Image (spheres, rainbow, N blue to C red):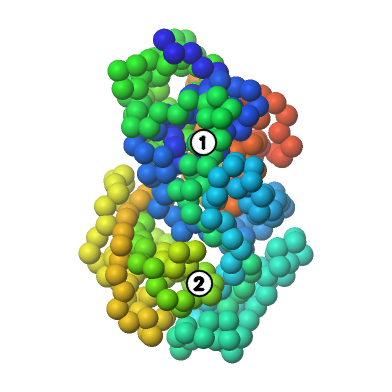
């Protein structure tokens, strides 16, 4: 039997950052990942450190503001580059969407007061910011400075830093069973080995319910399937990340839908999304209609782009809870089973939340009201 203080299951943003902070605080940590590090939703995202699209309550604004600050020095802390750099975000509002213009104008005021500068730009200013953008049908945009990074580099930087503090990391080691005695998980079965720990922490995103069911526990995590692609390196075309203000209206409740977002990366590639499908199946596939329609959206907004090659496309499940808040804390029914998943603006908050999660697992004082995210809030509703 291999014995640890904490076993972290899941090699995405939340798992690797929590493993790093746990090891840094002195815990003996084992991280288990069923495939490769960042092979799930974390490696399939745009890499944005979002600042202006989340909930406007004080706690969320604090996490966004302070998490963003931490990204400015995170590469130095972890000892590896994450490719993070500041970048503007233009959230386009289309003509006829006066309700979105009003809501984003109110949001801009609230964000700016909270220390996240956001302004509304008219269509002339949008065109000046993005000379090659087709602004036909656009009335303006909300603008903030956020950032973008390489999600694979971020995950691997956390992994290597965790190893330096003594953490053990095993990829391609799927968990197949929990052994339970009384109210505790006494061992985790993965591959041909059994591992034991004082705490078992499940941090698998959309796959979290699949793992917790091994312990007989259901967690209320849902998901949609999202598709995106990345282009070959291209000549300079886009100066900012660009998205649409009606993204959630477009995809909400639809069996399948396409919205548009594009982020330029340091090496010149464009990461473009996304097609969204409602499904109960967990998969990594892409569809011909999804990639085709997303590519058509890119061609519409940047008609001078011409021909380009797609070097990789992917599909990944995007997880969420019924109240669209994270689910973080001790699971009811077992004394030592913990979970953390469904974070909003995950990349932005990870430098802070990984540390808070580690403190919570170690039962140390956490400086924010962590009980807000507890799984017990759903148990109380049943």
Q: Is residue 352 left or right of residue 201?
A: right
Q: Is residue 105 left or right of residue 98?
A: right
Q: Which mark lies nearer to you, 2 or 1?
A: 1
User: Which quadrant: the N terminus?
Assistant: top left
Q: Relative to residue 178, is residue 161 depicted above or below?
A: below
Numbered mark located on residue 242 in the image: 2
Quarter of the image where one finds residue 194 = top left
Numbered mark located on residue 220 in the image: none
Query: Looking at the picture, how far across and down is residue 374, in whole percent?
Result: 59, 35
Spatial separation of the CA atoms under disc 2 and disc 1: 32 Å
Question: What residue is shown at x 59% (from left), y 89% (from top)?
Answer: 124
Question: What residue is shown at x 52% (from left), y 30% (from top)?
Answer: 163
Q: Nearer the viewer, residue 83 or 279?
A: 83
Quarter of the image where one finds residue 101 = bottom right
Say which residue label 1 marks: 160
Q: Is residue 254 visible?
A: no
Classify mark 2: helix, strand or loop: strand
Query: Looking at the picture, how far across and down is residue 136, in whole percent?
Result: 46, 89
Q: Residues within 10 Å of mark 1 (few under 14, many from 20)?
A: some
Q: Nearer the viewer, residue 179 or 30?
A: 30
Q: Nearer the viewer, residue 101 or 190?
A: 190
Question: What residue is shown at x 56% (from left), y 35% (from top)?
Answer: 161
Question: What residue is shown at x 48% (from left), y 13% (from top)?
Answer: 3
Q: Nearer the viewer, residue 19 or 372?
A: 19
Quarter of the image where one finds residue 122 = bottom right
Query: Looking at the picture, how far across and down is residue 368, in whole percent?
Result: 71, 40
Q: Is residue 241 left or right of residue 257?
A: right
Q: Is residue 157 visible?
A: yes
Q: Relative to residue 225, is residue 336 depicted above or below?
A: above
Q: Is residue 281 left or right of residue 14?
A: left
Q: Earlier in the sequence, mark 2 or mark 1?
A: 1
Q: Relative to residue 251, is residue 240 depicted above or below?
A: below
């Amino acid at each position: 039997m291999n014995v640890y203080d904490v076993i972290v299951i899941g090699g995405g943003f939340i798992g690797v950052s929590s493993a790093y902070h746990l090891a840094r605080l002195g815990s003996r940590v084992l991280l288990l990942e069923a495939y490769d590090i960042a092979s799930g939703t974390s490696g399939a995202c745009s890499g944005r450190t979002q600042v202006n699209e989340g909930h406007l309550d004080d706690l969320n604004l604090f996490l966004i503001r302070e998490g963003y600050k931490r990204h400015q020095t995170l590469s130095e802390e972890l000892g590896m580059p994450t490719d993070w750099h500041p970048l503007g975000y233009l959230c386009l509002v289309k003509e006829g969407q006066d309700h979105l213009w009003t809501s984003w104008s109110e949001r801009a005021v609230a964000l700016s007061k909270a220390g996240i500068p956001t302004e509304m730009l008219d269509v002339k200013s949008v065109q000046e910011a993005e000379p090659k953008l087709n602004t036909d049908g656009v009335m303006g945009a909300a603008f903030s400075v956020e950032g973008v990074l390489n999600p694979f580099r971020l995950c691997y930087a956390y992994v290597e830093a965790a190893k330096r503090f003594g953490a053990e990391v095993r990829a391609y080691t799927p968990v197949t069973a929990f052994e339970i005695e009384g109210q505790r998980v006494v061992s985790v079965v993965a591959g041909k080995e059994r591992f034991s720990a004082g705490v078992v922490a499940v941090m698998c995103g959309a796959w979290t319910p699949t793992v917790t069911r091994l312990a007989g526990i259901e967690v209320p995590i849902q998901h949609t399937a999202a598709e995106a692609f990345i282009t070959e390196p291209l000549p300079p075309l886009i100066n900012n990340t660009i998205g649409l203000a009606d993204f959630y209206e477009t995809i909400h409740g639809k069996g399948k839908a396409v919205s548009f977002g594009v982020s330029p990366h340091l090496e010149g590639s464009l990461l473009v999304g996304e097609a969204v499908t409602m499904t109960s199946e967990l998969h990594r596939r892409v569809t011909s209609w999804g990639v085709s329609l997303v590519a058509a959206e890119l061609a519409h907004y940047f008609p001078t782009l011409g021909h380009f090659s797609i070097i990789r496309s992917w599909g990944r499940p995007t997880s969420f809870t019924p109240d669209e808040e994270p689910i973080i804390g001790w699971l009811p029914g077992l004394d030592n089973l913990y979970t953390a998943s469904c974070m909003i603006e995950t990349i932005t908050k990870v430098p802070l939340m990984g540390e808070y999660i580690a403190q919570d697992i170690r039962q140390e004082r956490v400086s924010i009201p962590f009980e807000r995210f507890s799984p017990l809030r759903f148990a109380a509703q049943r």
